[in-house]
Amino acid sequence: MGLLKIIRKIKQKEKEVRLLVLGLDNSGKTTILKKLNGEDVHTISPTLGFTISSFEHKNLKLNVWDVGGQKSLRAFWRNYFEATDGLIFVVDSSDTLRLNDAKEELKNLLQEERLLGATLLVLANKQDLSGALNCQTICELLEVDSIKTHHWKIVGSSAYTGLNLLSAIDWLLDDIASRIFISD
């Protein structure tokens, strides 16, 4: 029996998924997780290091790693890649000055061998703010259409209002489940 099949059988039994949430600082990563977990989103401070949240959704246990996005912390992102089933990359749609930085960071992530099997969800966050670029424009600027190495989807969202967060997470979990949970 191959190692991949053993891992799939273990994950099938436990119905556990590991998600990694990355993006530049102030993109809304922590706010998204707090909103999904039903927590107050009015008092958020920058993530220094990482936080782990566990909650259940769609009969799955989600272990979500939220890693700080400050430039000084990005070099440490690779310490969290192991056994990642899904990558949520959060972009601040209103921060047009740093979209090129976000594009470069996403490009670097997609070249990481340990993330090759991970499903990619790009959240074009802060759609509720005036001046936010629409999802199609973000897609073009990040060159997401050129991604051939991962299953991916880009979704316009708002961590503050909750816009599209559940449907985006549902898509991510459905894609992961279709790849890693097997039936006997």
Image: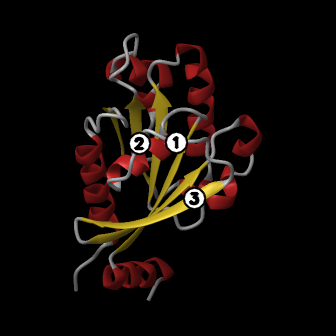
Report the residue at 44% width, 62% height from top: 85
Labels 1 and 2 touching (C-beta < 8 A): yes
Q: Amino acid at mark 2?
A: Val
Residue 130 in sight: yes
Report the residue at 73% width, 51% height from top: 76
Instruction: Find disc 3 in the rendering and name its residue.
Output: 51
Q: Is residue 71 above or below residue 5?
A: above
Residue 41's disc is 2
Q: Residue 160 appears at what percent x and percent y?
A: 36, 35
Image quarter of the C terminus: bottom left
| Viewer-closest of 6 and 44 | 44
* Kind of element beneath mark 1: loop
Q: Residues within 10 Å of mark 1 (few under 14, many from 20)?
A: few
Q: Residue 93 appears at what percent x and percent y?
A: 44, 22
Report the residue at 68% width, 37% height from top: 70
Q: Residue furthest bottom?
A: 1
Instruction: Find disc 1 in the rendering and name its residue.
Output: 44
How many numbered marks appear?
A: 3
* Kind of element beneath mark 3: strand
Q: Is residue 104 above or below residue 180?
A: above
Question: Which badge, 3 or 2, is on the more N-terminal residue?
Answer: 2
Q: Amino acid at mark 3?
A: Thr
Instruction: Answer with left or right where residue 15 lies relative to residue 18.
Output: left
Q: Nearer the viewer, mark 3 or mark 1?
A: 1
Image quarter of the N terminus: bottom left
> CA separation, marks 3 and 1?
13 Å
Q: Amino acid at mark 1?
A: Ile
| Viewer-closest of 43 and 130 | 43
Q: Residues within 10 Å of mark 3 (few under 14, many from 20)?
A: few
Instruction: Answer with left or right where residue 161 lies relative to residue 104.
Output: left
